[in-house]
Amino acid sequence: MHITVQRDKLSNAVSHVSKAVSSRTTIPILTGIKIKTDDEGLTLTASDSDISIEVQIPLEEAGEWGVTIHQPGSIVLTARIFSEIVRKLPSNEIDIKVDDRLVTQIRSGQAEFTINGMDANEYPQLPHLEEDKVFSVPCDLLKSMIRQTVFGVSTSEMRPILTGLMWSLEKGQLRFVATDSHRLASRTAMVECREDLSFHNVVVPGKSCNELVKILDDEQNPADIVVADNQILVKSKHILFYSRLLEGTYPDTTRIIPQGSKTEITVSTKEFLQSIERASLLSREGKSNVVKLVTLPDGTVEITSNAPEIGKVTDILAPKAMNGEELKISFNAKYMIDALRAIDSSEIKASFTGPMSPFVIRPTDHDWMLHLILPVRTY
């Protein structure tokens, strides 16, 4: 193999695929990045058997040179070393030459590296997915949907299915749901797809979703998503992102969302968030991070927190509207802060059905988003 490639394009592609390289693998070749050429350009691939990422550098794009292929071929180079070399090379052109013994020469400007490669034929093949379940969603929307829910996935392996984000599609409406059994985050959006396309219980690992957010761009370019039996594939521009799906049945979360409410509070998202953050300054120091909310007869809301060894904090908040029964409720401040930070509307409505029942937070200006939090028993 012999190629000349633009450094910035190679560096960018290497940083994308590196996210799929495992540092702890029993298969030595998976510590590497596979580099392969064809008539279309240069393709880099990395996989840790949960996530696989493939990035293509075309010969040229929008009139800008990307790579020249002098002699086609393929090689696998150790990811850690290769990515460091590419980042630190001096010139904007990189020349890569591989001989019959897989010895790889990397030249740029006055710098030259010689490293040993691995046989690309031993690299596992990426899965081939049947493309019958395909839909499109703009990259920026997909990123914000993940960001607004993925923090709710469980970090405990006690129930592995809860460590993933549940995707479902019905009548063109895509829904993401995350829960760790103490809280729930849900976000929906209309997407482009065939009218008859629907699926449920597609659970993508939270780790995969976080990595996907890092490599998608912030533009409105559509990402095509292919859903198969045990894999999902996201295609965007020159990137292919594969992730395995979690096995098992995701719990039916619709049953736990209360339909009515006894107390409703409408409040500025920013003011409420700042108040909870102030209250959690002390509660964070204690083990529980619990904040207490009490509705007062004069129409205000009192937010308090008490850490016996340190002290207490009281904050009074004037809501935009409040109706229903008086309420005293305690909850984990971190869950509330995560939910409020994910909401991009200026006002929220919190609906309570009692001090020991889950409560719901929704934006006042749309119904795409819902957060549910279980209270903490302190009374």
Image: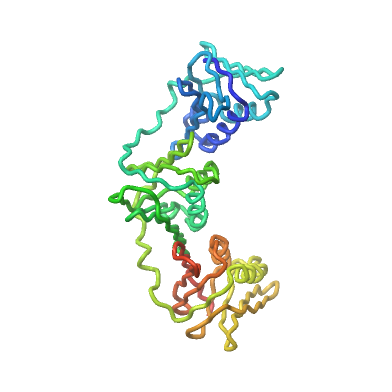
Q: Residue at point 70% right, 19% down?
A: 109
Residue most extreme to the left: 196
Residue most extreme to the top: 100
- Residue 150's place in the image compared with 103, above or below, is below
Front residue of 9/296: it is 9
Residue most extreme to the bottom: 297
Q: Residue at point 64% right, 66% down?
A: 284
Q: Please state the horizontal and vertical placement of residue 340, each as a whole percent of the image.
A: 56, 65
Q: Please state the horizontal and vertical placement of residue 146, each as a whole percent of the image.
A: 49, 52
Q: Please state the horizontal and vertical placement of residue 280, each as a whole percent of the image.
A: 63, 68
Q: Please state the horizontal and vertical placement of residue 132, each as a whole percent of the image.
A: 30, 41
Task: Left or right? Give the position of 214 relative to 200.
Answer: right
Front residue of 125/344: it is 344
Q: Quadrant of residue 281?
A: bottom right
Task: Left or right? Give the position of 162 relative to 108.
Answer: left
Instruction: Tally the marks.
Output: 0
- Residue 117's place in the image compared with 374, above or below, is above
- Residue 45's place in the image compared with 312, above or below, is above
Q: Residue at point 70% right, 72% down?
A: 310
